[in-house]
Image (spheres, rainbow, N blue to C red):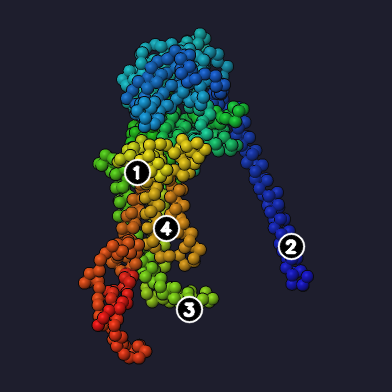
Amino acid sequence: MTPNKTADNRNMFLFIALSMVILFGYQFFVLNPQMEKEQAAREKAAAAASADPATPNMPGVSGGAIVITREQAVARTPRIPIETPSLKGSLSLTGARFDDLFLTKYEETLDKNSPNVELFRPEGAQHAYYAESGWLGQNIAGLPNASTQWTLVSGDKLSVGKNVVLGYDNGAGLRFERTYAIDENYMITVTEKVINVSGVPVTLAPYANIVRDGVPESLGKNQILHEGAVGSFSKDASGTAYTRPELKFHSWEKDAKKKDFKQDSTGGWMGITDKYWLASVIPAQNKAVHAAMKATPKGNGEFIYQVGYVANPVTLKPGTQISETHHLFAGAKVSSILEGYQKSLGLPNFTWAIDWGFLWFLTQPMFWVLDQLYQFMGNFGLAILGLTVVVKLIFYPLAHKSYESMTKMKMLQPKVEELKKKYEGDAQKMQIEMMNMYQKEKVNPMTGCLPMLLQIPVFYALYKVLFVTIEMRHAPFFGYINDLSARDPSTIFNLFGLIPYDPATVPLIGSILGGPLHIGIVAILYGFTMWLTQGMNPPAPDPIQRKIFAFMPLMFTFIMAPFAVGLLIYWTWSNVLTIAQQYSIMHRLKVENPIDTFIGKFRKPTAETTQTATVTATAGDDDGKVIKGEVISGGTTAAGTKRSRKKKDV
C-alpha cells in the first residue's frame, strides 16, 4: 500500500472514530439528560393532575364484545325518536346517550335505495359511536352513568321547536334533569340541572364526551386529509389565543405523548372527524374546562377513542340547584353551517373542522369563490371549470412571461444542437457559448421555471379544496358523470360502457381490471393533454431525460385514474387552458408546435404559402450556371414549413 493511501485510510478511520465519539457523547451528555428531565416533568404533571380534585379525570369507557347487530342494539333500550330536516334517529333512555343518528340529506351511495349516512351507532354493535354527558364526583353514590334508566318528563319526540326533558332521582337526595333542544341543522343544546335535597353539600363536575369504539381501517390513511381527533383550545385564561391539536387515526394511539392528550382551556370545542362528518362537544365559551383526547387499547388491536372535557367542580349546598349548558354538533361539515355556528356561539376556529391545510390562506378564499360560482351556475362541475379560469386569469401575466420564455428557448433549440455537436467533449466551452447565445438573444432560461414554481402552491391549494369539501360529494356533472367525488365510472375494458359488462367481475383478473387498470375517458383526456403540453415545451437536453418525459403522460394517466373525476376534470381543463395560452404565443412567434404541425397535414397549399420561381446560380454555386429543369417551391419556414425541390420542365 502506498504512503498516500495509508495516510488516507488513517485519516478516514480517525474521522469515523471522532464522529462516533461526538455522536455518543452528545447522546449521553445532552439528549439523555434532556429526555429524563422531560419525562420527570410529565410524571410530575400527571401526578399533580390525579391528586388535584379540581382537575377530575374523564369517565372511563369499556368496549364490549361484538355480539349483536346494530338493529338489535337499538331495540334493546327504550328510546325517544329524533326527527329534523337534517337528522333522524333516536335518543336512548338508558344512559341518555345520542347513539342512533342518521344524516337525512346524505346517502351512502347514489343508488335510489341507498340508506342515509350513519353517524352514531349504539354500544355493542361494531364500531359503536355515541355522545354522552353527565356529572362526576368523588364518593357520591348513584350518579347517573351508562346503565342509568332515565324517565321521560315531557315531550314525545325531539324535533325543531319540540324539546324533550328527562329526569332521574338517585334515591340519595340528588335529582337530575336534562333538557334537549335541536335546530334544523346539526346543533343540539343540552341543559343539565341538579337539585340537592340531601341535606349535605355535594361537589360535582359536569362533563361531555364523544366515544368511538374502533374505526374502519380505511380511516386516517389519506395523507392529504386529517381524520381523527380535532379541536380548538385557548392557550391561557384570556381565551384569545388558541391551539388546534389534530390527532390522526392509526398514529394518535401509537404516540405515547398523544394517546392521552390533555389541555386546559377556557371554552373551545373538541370532537372526532371523518372526511365529511363531525361529532363535537362544545362547552360554554366562558367556562374553564379540562379537555382530553384519549386512545385506550381494547386488547384486540383496536382502540376506543374518547374526546371530551370535564369542567371545574362546583359545590352544591343543601336545598340549592345548579345548571350547566353545553352543545353537541353531530352532522356534515358544510362550511356555511360551521361558519354560522362559529359566529352565533362565538366558537373559535370552528370552520377548521374542515381540513383547510397549511395553505389555508389560499384554500379558504378559493372555496369561497368556488361556492359563489356554484350558487350562480347550479352545477359543481361548471363551478370547477369557472374557478380554474379565474385562477388562470390571475396568473395570466406571470404564465405568459413563462410560456414566452419557453417558446424562445424552443426557437433556439436548433442552435443549441449545433453547439452540442461543435463542442462535443468540451462541456464547459459549450455552456459558455450557450450562455452567450442566450444573452445575445435576450433569453433567460430561469424565466420559464420560476413563474411555474410560484403557481404550484396555488394548484395544490385548489386540489385540496376540491378534495376536502363536502359540496363535491355526489355532485353530478353532465352525461354519465353523476358523482364528481368518485372515480370515473367509465373504463376502456368495456369500451366506456358500450359493452354491457363490468370488468371488475371477470374471474381472476377482475380486481386488476377494476382497480389499477381502470382507465376512464377523463383519465385518457388528461393523459392526452399532458402529452400535448409536453410537446409545447422545449425538449430535455439529455436523451435519457427525453425518453423519461415521453413516458410520463402514460404513467400519470394510470396514477391519476383512481382520483375523483372532479379532480381529473380540473387537471384536464387546466391543461387545456395552458395549451391554449402556449399555442397563442407559439403561433404568433411562428414556432413549431404539435397543433400547427397536425393542422398542416390537412391544409392544402395556397398562393399565399407557396412560391414557385426559377432558381439561378448565386455566388455560392459551384459553376455559376443556371440550374435548368428545377423549381424550388415553398414559403416561409419560420414555423417549420418544409421546403421541397422538385423537377419541372422550364
As drawn, the label of residue 14 is: 2
Q: What residue type is labelled 3?
A: Lys
> What residue appears at the point 72 percent right and 55 percent down from the top-left corner?
21
Q: Which of marks 4 and 3 is in front?
A: 3
Q: Is residue 410 left or right of residue 28?
A: left
Name the quadrant containing residue 328.
top left
Is tag 4's residue or tag 1's residue first in the polypeptide sequence?
Answer: 1
Where's residue 152, x and y in %?
41, 11
> What residue appears at the point 63 percent right and 35 percent down from the top-left corner?
43
Q: In which quarter of the image is the C terminus?
A: bottom left
As drawn, the label of residue 597 is: none
Name the quadrant containing residue 562.
top left
To which residue does mark 4 refer? 453
To which residue does mark 1 refer? 367
Cα distance in 3D space between marks 1 and 2: 59 Å
Where's residue 243, x and y in %?
47, 40
Q: What residue type is labelled 1?
A: Phe
As drawn, the label of residue 422 is: 3
